[in-house]
């Protein structure tokens, strides 16, 4: 019979060795400098690299589903380290607290998508708010943690690897990352196409729904803060959350105020809305939530080319995503040196269908020229890599090519 604990301990030791490499401190310094507008070379961050496509599940040995999640995580981090980018592997692991209600039931109704037709496939929206009166089905959430269930998860992980790696409990909030930006949950609750009609057909009703969601998120965040459940490990900026103005990420340091933390927001579902519509029906409701945090990173996959003027309303904004769908030149001209650009070249043309070295170099050089001309602070983030055509080695090759171009340009 396989000994789950023995399997996990071996991987945990490898992970700890990687996390304590001197290069991790060099990367911390690099990201801290970039995010505080110091003159640095642009960091490279590979946020996704089609791990599932190229990982052999036959390697997995843990029988316990909970421990198997960490077995997969350790393998993923080994693969991340092999890429050679500027990702920081932190010397601790995290177990999520068990919230009540559950994260998937945070609004009192199911929040999610319909069933995907195949593993890794797309799923349609399956909204719960169909009629206007369905808004009354939503419940005001509370910040409540099932301490017994959380302790059981913690003790199981600590028993397995706690003497090798610190185990941090994420007690932050059911409204973190994607749940707090309103936009993501709104589309799941109401349907993406439907909210496009709502702004014209029932704007007052939609404003009522948005105000309810904003107030609930603020309420739960306030409750979590008062309970001392935010920690220095709750930084989020869809990159490496380091900056001179804020304390570094750290496990086990609770009682942190939101003003001490990075936060991340986006409105991908509003990418086709006009700037004014985006402002009226989303940004104005996000602002009160974002203002409570120390620094803000904004944007995931949406095109923000024509919304940057609106984003300037965010007083603590520090990072803006410039995605494959954005006009890099127009974004750079508007952003200048005022914010850090998270430049995200198109993964399809970078690595997903093969690696054309000349094309990668040309794309990178053109972007570098634009950013230098506009005095931009930026990183290069390769994300949403759904496939590498079963050639995982191309990701590390891509990083090597980009690093060579950085050395030439900077």
Image: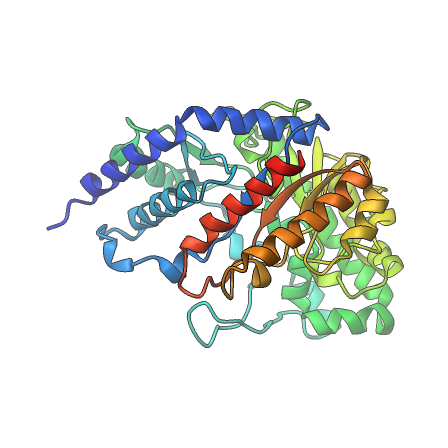
Residue drawn where x is 69% and y is 61% of the image = 186
Q: Which residue is at the far bottom?
A: 117
User: Which quadrant of the structure image shows residue 157?
Assistant: top left
Residue drawn where x is 82% and y is 59% of the image = 207
Quadrant where the C terminus is found in the figure? top right
Give x and y (percent) for residue 340.
72, 38
Left or right of 37, for residue 81 = left
Residue drawn where x is 69% and y is 51% of the image = 266
Give x and y (percent) for residue 390.
40, 64
**Nearer-the-camera pick, 366 or 6:** 366
**160 up-or-down from 279: above or below:** above
Give x and y (percent) for residue 114.
53, 72
**196 up-or-down from 238: above or below:** below
Left or right of 95, for residue 136 = right
Give x and y (percent) for residue 83.
44, 44
User: Which quadrant of the structure image shows residue 407?
Assistant: top right
């Amino acid at each position: 019979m396989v000994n789950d604990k023995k399997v996990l301990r071996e991987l945990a030791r490898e992970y700890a060795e990687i996390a304590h490499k001197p290069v991790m401190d060099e990367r911390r310094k690099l990201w801290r400098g970039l995010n505080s507008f110091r003159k640095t070379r642009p960091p490279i961050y590979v946020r996704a690299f089609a791990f599932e496509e190229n990982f052999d599940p036959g390697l997995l040995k843990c029988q316990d589903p909970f421990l198997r999640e960490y077995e997969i995580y350790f393998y993923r981090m080994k693969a991340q380290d092999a890429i050679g980018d500027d990702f920081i592997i932190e010397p601790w692991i995290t177990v999520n607290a068990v919230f009540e209600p559950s994260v998937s039931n945070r609004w009192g109704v199911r929040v999610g998508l319909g069933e995907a037709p195949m593993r890794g496939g797309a799923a349609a929206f399956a909204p719960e708010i169909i009629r206007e009166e369905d808004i009354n089905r939503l419940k005001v959430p509370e910040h409540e943690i099932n301490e017994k269930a959380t302790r059981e998860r913690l003790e199981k992980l600590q028993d397995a690897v706690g003497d090798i790696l610190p185990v941090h409990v994420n007690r932050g909030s059911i409204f973190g990352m994607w749940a707090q930006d309103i936009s993501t949950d709104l589309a799941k609750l109401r349907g993406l196409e439907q909210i496009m009609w709502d702004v014209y057909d029932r704007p007052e009703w939609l404003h009522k729904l948005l105000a309810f969601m904003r107030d609930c998120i603020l309420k739960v965040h306030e409750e979590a803060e008062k309970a001392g459940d935010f920690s220095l490990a709750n930084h989020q900026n869809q990159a490496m959350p380091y900056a001179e103005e804020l304390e570094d990420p750290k496990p086990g340091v609770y009682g942190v105020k939101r003003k001490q933390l990075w936060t991340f927001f986006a409105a991908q579902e509003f990418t086709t809305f006009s700037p004014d519509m985006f402002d009226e029906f989303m940004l104005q409701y996000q602002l009160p939530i974002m203002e409570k945090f120390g620094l803000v990173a904004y944007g995931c996959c949406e095109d923000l080319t024509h919304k940057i003027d609106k984003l300037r309303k965010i007083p603590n904004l520090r990072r803006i995503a410039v995605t494959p769908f954005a006009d890099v030149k127009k974004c750079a001209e508007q952003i200048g040196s005022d914010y850090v650009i998270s430049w995200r070249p198109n993964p399809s043309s970078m690595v997903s269908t093969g690696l054309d070295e000349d094309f990668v170099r040309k794309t990178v050089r053109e972007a570098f020229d634009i950013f230098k001309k506009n005095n931009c602070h930026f990183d290069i983030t390769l994300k949403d890599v759904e496939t590498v055509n079963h050639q995982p080695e191309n990701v590390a090759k891509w990083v090597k090519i980009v690093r060579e171009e950085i050395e030439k340009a900077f």
